[in-house]
Image (spheres, rainbow, N blue to C red):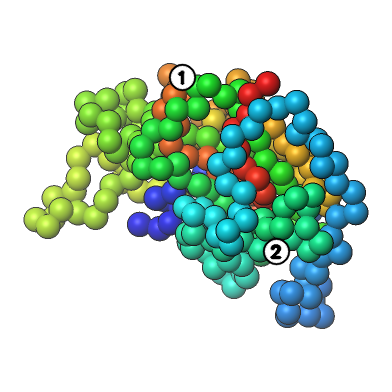
């Protein structure tokens, strides 16, 4: 099973998803044909203005600051568009962080993913919370710093999953609840005798009928933000997150049992920096 199955990306995102139009430009200009050097194609002059006090007035519990050189448990994935470049390598977990050119306020390292052009659903970055449900009920929402590089998409979709719609969380729920109050996780490999595992979704194929996919795990509580070439601080209240119905629709969003969150881009070029991810109260 691929890394984004385990760590819970919003798989098979499609252009018809209502979150796709969350403002900004889509950044899908073609890469220069005169260079096959990704370093040259994605050359980045960097930001010019940073408001280091943009998070003032909030109480933030940092989940990952990337200062130790690697984001433990962070994974990248993409839609496997033939021939595309992506760094870090797709389906890689414990992604190494990258030095921020010139730094950002007190931060020296961040997570940086770039590549494309993706043509099927896009690409993403995800983090699984520690292998048990994580109680976020004392927080107002998720916060982070982010920017895009010159060829990157502006629209970033941010999603969270609780035990209702998370692959790992749902797999630990009683079988009787799967497809009723929690989603169907994707089937593991067949058992040694060849009999398929019961109470699981047979495939993550986005071309399966919608009525089948509506039982599957993977339907984020999500919203969109607009990135610019400057570092900006973003905060997303849990109360503002919504599901779009392309997979299992949860009866509620249980912030006391959250399993994962992710940052996803649509088709086009991904050049995204993420830093200082945390949970805030105000």
Position of 27 with respect to 130 (left or right) is right
**Viewer-closest of 19 and 70:** 70
The x, y position of residue 226, in whole percent, is: 76, 40
Q: Is residue 231 visible?
A: yes
Position of 31 with respect to 210 (left or right) is right
The x, y position of residue 72, in whole percent, is: 49, 54
**Viewer-closest of 68 and 94:** 68
Quadrant the C terminus occupies: top right
**Viewer-closest of 79 and 259:** 259
**Viewer-closest of 122 and 76:** 76
Residue 99 is labelled as 2
Position of 174 with respect to 33 (left or right) is left
- Residue carrying label 1: 252
Residue 161's place in the image compared with 15, above or below, is above
Secondary structure found at label 1: loop
Q: Quadrant of residue 272?
A: bottom right
Secondary structure found at label 2: strand
Mark 1 or mark 2, which is nearer to you?
Answer: 2
Quadrant the N terminus occupies: bottom left
């Amino acid at each position: 099973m691929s890394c984004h199955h385990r760590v819970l990306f919003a798989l098979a995102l499609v252009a018809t998803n209502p979150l796709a139009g969350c403002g900004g430009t889509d950044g899908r200009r073609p890469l220069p044909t005169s260079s096959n050097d990704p370093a040259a194609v994605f050359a980045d002059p960097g930001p010019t203005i940073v408001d280091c006090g943009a998070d003032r007035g909030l109480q933030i519990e940092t989940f990952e600051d990337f200062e130790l050189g690697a984001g433990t448990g962070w994974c990248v994935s993409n839609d496997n568009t033939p021939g595309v470049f992506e760094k870090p390598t797709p389906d890689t977990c414990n992604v190494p962080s990258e030095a921020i050119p010139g730094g950002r306020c007190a931060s020296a390292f961040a997570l940086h993913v770039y590549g494309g052009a993706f043509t099927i659903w896009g690409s993403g970055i995800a983090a699984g919370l520690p292998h048990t449900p994580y109680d976020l009920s004392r927080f107002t929402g998720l916060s982070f710093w982010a920017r895009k590089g010159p060829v990157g998409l502006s629209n970033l979709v941010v999603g969270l999953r609780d035990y209702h719609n998370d692959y790992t969380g749902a797999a630990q729920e009683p079988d009787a609840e799967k497809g009723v109050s929690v989603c169907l996780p994707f089937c593991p490999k067949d058992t040694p005798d060849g009999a398929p595992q019961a109470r699981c979704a047979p495939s993550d194929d986005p071309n399966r009928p919608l009525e089948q996919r509506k039982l599957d795990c993977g339907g984020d509580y999500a919203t969109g933000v607009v990135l610019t070439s400057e570092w900006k601080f973003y905060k997303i209240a849990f109360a503002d997150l919504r599901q779009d119905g392309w997979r299992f629709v949860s009866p509620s969003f249980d912030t006391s049992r959250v399993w994962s969150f992710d940052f996803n881009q649509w088709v086009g070029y991904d050049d995204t920096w993420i830093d200082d991810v945390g949970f805030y109260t105000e």
